[in-house]
């Protein structure tokens, strides 16, 4: 740090403003904080930089305007990890995951994670998979595999390959439609119904034909946290295989459910125990309990990954096989995933999921006790979340409550409508993750009751306030 004194004003700078500015410059050199007197650079690369501490503070002080992640009950994504895991992450931010030749042990750890997940999901034997940026990339790769496999079968039979279609429900995440648009596949979307927010075999059957590359079913929907009838859909596909000779694969989108069902509902079959399930995606950064940036795709068997989707290249002196949409990416979250696997093991994950479930049940009961809400799908197999709605008409609605709750206490509990044809249904939904313990669930329920009491007195929100309500489902 410089210890020079502020320079005296030069004769040329007799203008008081210039003098003041020169003095401020000198003081800023001594004390830092110059950024406090200037607008944040927001348009072009600044000509000169600023001290490291100032840059850090500028960003930190702006981020205060964001919501606090632990009060974000919309997101499925992990908002807290153990200090030891944080240390692993911090110490490995500079390790490019794709440099397999240089970092072979990191590549080995990725493979260990894939093997552990394949085992958790009951793969029948040795198989393969991929680390991805999240479930979205895993779904793109999994669905591409379905398309490639379908095309291979069609080409072998000398049949038309120009009109592939993919079947899924309106309860899926937007990434499934994105895949269809990006990769030229006709989406056959089964609409939800007035009182049915997941899909089953009777919904799927009419859509299947020889151009169906696969069916996607969800384990833990983004909207209500329930599962499609995966057993029923599998049975349908098995029957169709025998009756019509059409071998239609099933992909399970277990983005959230893949780390919940094995521990809370171990006897429910949704994974490779079912014959037609050929691939599964899961987000490590959701209930895998890792910070954002990690997902997994697991195949039932090696042969479910088409050879020509794998690129072999001579990279930095070694032949490397890649099956990704990205190339360079961090290693930190792969290592953090492995940390969780070896740190918690099966019993640890089970204990954590049961903890979340116990707090979910307590929160659900308290919300019910407020007296104005009904719970959605209470008692069914569900992610650790409470989905609820007003039981009757009031002068205010779910969107008003979400806004009032945010205004009074900063909770981010989203309100949204369901996809068609259940788009008349308004829902609020609170994720119960590890950072929402017993005391906070009580506080949250009291705050919801308080927000309702305020709205009861003052009525619904003004239209201007309504526009600010958080309506995303959270991801
Ligand atoms: C069911 C489902 N599938 C896919 C995704 C996309 O996952 P990611 O955010 O890991 O890309 C989400 C995210 O919320 C999801 O809930």
Image (cartoon, helix red, strand yellow):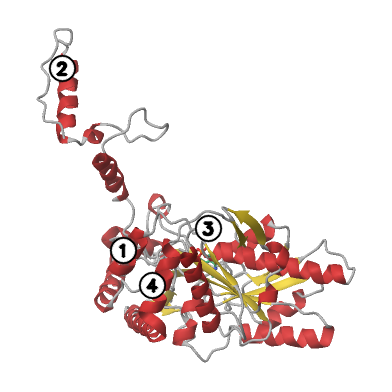
Label 3 near label 1: C-beta < 8 Å? no
Residue marked by disc 3: 98
**Residue 21 screen position, x and y as percent:** 19, 21
Whole-number angstrom distance, CA of label 1 to CA of label 4: 11 Å
Dot 2 or dot 3, earlier in sequence:
2
Dot 2 or dot 1, earlier in sequence:
2
Within 8 Å of ligand 1, the CB of disc 3?
no
Query: 351 or 457, which lies in front?
Result: 351
Secondary structure under tag 3 reads loop
Whole-number angstrom distance, CA of label 2 to CA of label 4: 58 Å
Dot 1 or dot 3, earlier in sequence:
1
Q: Which residue is depicted at the point 14% across and 29% down?
A: 27
Whole-number angstrom distance, CA of label 4 to CA of label 3: 19 Å
Query: 388 or 352, which lies in front?
Result: 352
Residue extending furthest bottom? 267
**Residue 62 location, quadrant:** top left
**Residue 228 location, quadrant:** bottom right
């Amino acid at each position: 740090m410089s210890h020079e004194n502020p320079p005296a004003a030069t004769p040329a700078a007799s203008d008081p403003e210039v003098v003041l500015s020169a003095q401020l410059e000198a003081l800023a050199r001594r004390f830092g904080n110059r950024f406090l007197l200037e607008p944040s650079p927001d348009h072009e690369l600044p000509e000169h930089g600023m001290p490291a501490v100032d840059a850090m503070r500028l960003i930190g002080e702006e981020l205060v305007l964001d919501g606090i992640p632990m009060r974000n009950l919309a997101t499925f994504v992990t908002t807290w990890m153990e200090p030891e895991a944080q240390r692993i992450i911090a110490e490995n931010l500079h390790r490019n995951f794709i440099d397999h030749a240089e970092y072979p042990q990191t590549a080995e750890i990725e493979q260990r994670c894939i093997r552990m997940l394949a085992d958790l999901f009951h793969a029948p034997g040795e198989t393969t998979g991929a680390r991805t940026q999240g479930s979205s990339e895993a779904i793109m790769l999994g669905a591409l595999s379905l398309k490639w496999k379908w095309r291979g079968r069609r080409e072998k039979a000398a049949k038309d390959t120009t009109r592939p279609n993919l079947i899924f429900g309106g309860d899926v995440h937007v990434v499934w439609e994105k895949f269809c648009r990006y990769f030229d596949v006709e989406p056959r979307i089964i609409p939800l119904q007035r009182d049915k927010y997941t899909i089953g075999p009777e919904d799927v059957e009419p859509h299947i034909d020889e151009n169906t590359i696969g069916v996607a079913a969800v384990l833990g929907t983004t909207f209500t946290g329930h599962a499609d009838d995966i057993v029923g859909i599998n049975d349908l596909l098995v029957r169709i295989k025998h009756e019509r000779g059409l071998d239609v694969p099933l992909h399970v989108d277990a983005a959230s459910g893949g780390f919940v069902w094995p521990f809370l509902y171990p006897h429910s079959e949704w994974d490779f125990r079912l014959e037609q399930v050929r691939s599964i995606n899961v987000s490590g950064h959701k209930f895998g309990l890792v910070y954002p940036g990690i997902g997994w795709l697991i195949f039932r068997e090696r042969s479910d990954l088409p050879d020509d989707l794998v690129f072999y290249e001579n990279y930095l002196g070694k032949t490397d096989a890649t099956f990704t949409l990205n190339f360079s990416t961090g290693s930190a979250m792969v290592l953090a995933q492995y940390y969780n696997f070896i740190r918690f093991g099966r019993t640890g994950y089970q204990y954590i999921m049961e903890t979340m479930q116990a707090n979910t049940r307590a929160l659900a009961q308290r919300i019910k006790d407020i007296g104005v809400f009904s719970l959605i799908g209470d008692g069914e197999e569900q992610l650790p979340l409470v989905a609820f709605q007003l039981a009757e008409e009031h002068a205010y609605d779910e969107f008003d409550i979400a806004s009032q709750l945010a205004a009074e206490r900063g909770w981010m509990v989203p309100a949204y409508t369901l996809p068609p044809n259940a788009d008349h249904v308004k829902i609020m939904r609170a994720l119960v993750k590890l950072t929402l313990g017993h005391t906070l669930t009580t506080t949250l329920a009291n705050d919801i009751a308080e927000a309702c009491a305020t709205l009861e007195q003052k009525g619904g929100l003004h239209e201007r306030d309504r526009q600010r309500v958080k309506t995303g489902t959270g991801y």
